[in-house]
Image (cartoon, helix red, strand yellow):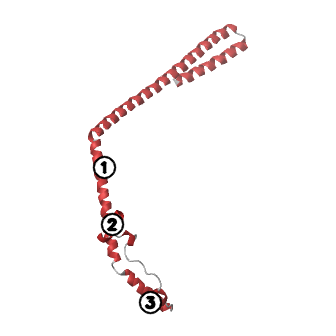
Amino acid sequence: MEREQRSLEREEKKLEMEIKKMAKEGNREGCTILAKQLVQLRKQKARSLAAGSKVRSIGFQNKAMGANAKLAGAMGTTSKTMADMNTIMKPEKIAADMRAFGQAAMKMEMTEEMMNDVLDDVFDESGDEEEGDRIMNQVLDEIGIEVSGKMAAAPAAHRGRLGEDAASRLPTDAELEAQLAKLRA
């Protein structure tokens, strides 16, 4: 198509040059005949351009149709895959698995808390505090600071678990009975 288009353009230029040559010579009849040929050539050139445009348009439409066909095939494959996955993965089973996972995670958390409590108890009973006091006194004695007299008046650290105090211990049976008697009165 492009070769034909270039060929028509060359012919058009030749005809234009011949028309100019005949016009210089004064040959009016030859100019008229060549002018008619030039008009016909230009119409042929326009038809050739239109045909080329239509062919390119059809080519683009063909590519678009091919892409749509591939897209339709891919969508069909995707829908089949999704249907297969729906038959394989049952929502009830997934929910049950998630519940089982949650329970196992909760058990693991409780076990970890119990282990931490046991380790805390073991380390609290090891006598680290007495050893720390002994080392502190030794260092202070080396420096020359007398602490024993001044430290005796200082309050001692509470022994037991954090958050435990006299108010948090459970009342005895006698204390409960006394409180009940007060309420009845």
Corner quadrant of residue 39: top right
* The one of 176 and 76 positioned closer to us in this rendering: 176
The residue that mark 1 highlights is 98
Q: Do the numbered discs 1 and 3 sit on residues whose CB atoms are within 8 Å?
A: no
Rendered location of residue 155, percent (x, y): 45, 81
Q: From the viewer's perspective, is the residue at label 2 or at label 3 nearer?
A: 2
- Write the residue at 30% across / 46% down: 95
Q: Which mark is residue 37?
A: none
* The one of 97 and 35 positioned closer to us in this rendering: 97
- In the rendered structure, which disc, 2 or 3, sits on the residue that comes first in sequence? 3
The residue that mark 3 highlights is 138
The residue that mark 2 highlights is 181
- Write the residue at 57% across / 17% down: 46
Check the image and report above or below for 181 versus 153.
Answer: above
Element at badge 1?
A: helix
Q: Residues within 10 Å of mark 2 (few under 14, many from 20)?
A: few
* The one of 78 and 101 positioned closer to us in this rendering: 101
Amino acid type, residue under disc 3 in the picture: Gln
- Write the residue at 44% across / 88% down: 137
Q: From the viewer's perspective, is the residue at label 1 or at label 2 nearer?
A: 2
Amino acid type, residue under disc 1 in the picture: Met
Q: From the viewer's perspective, is the residue at label 1 or at label 3 nearer?
A: 3
Amino acid type, residue under disc 2 in the picture: Ala
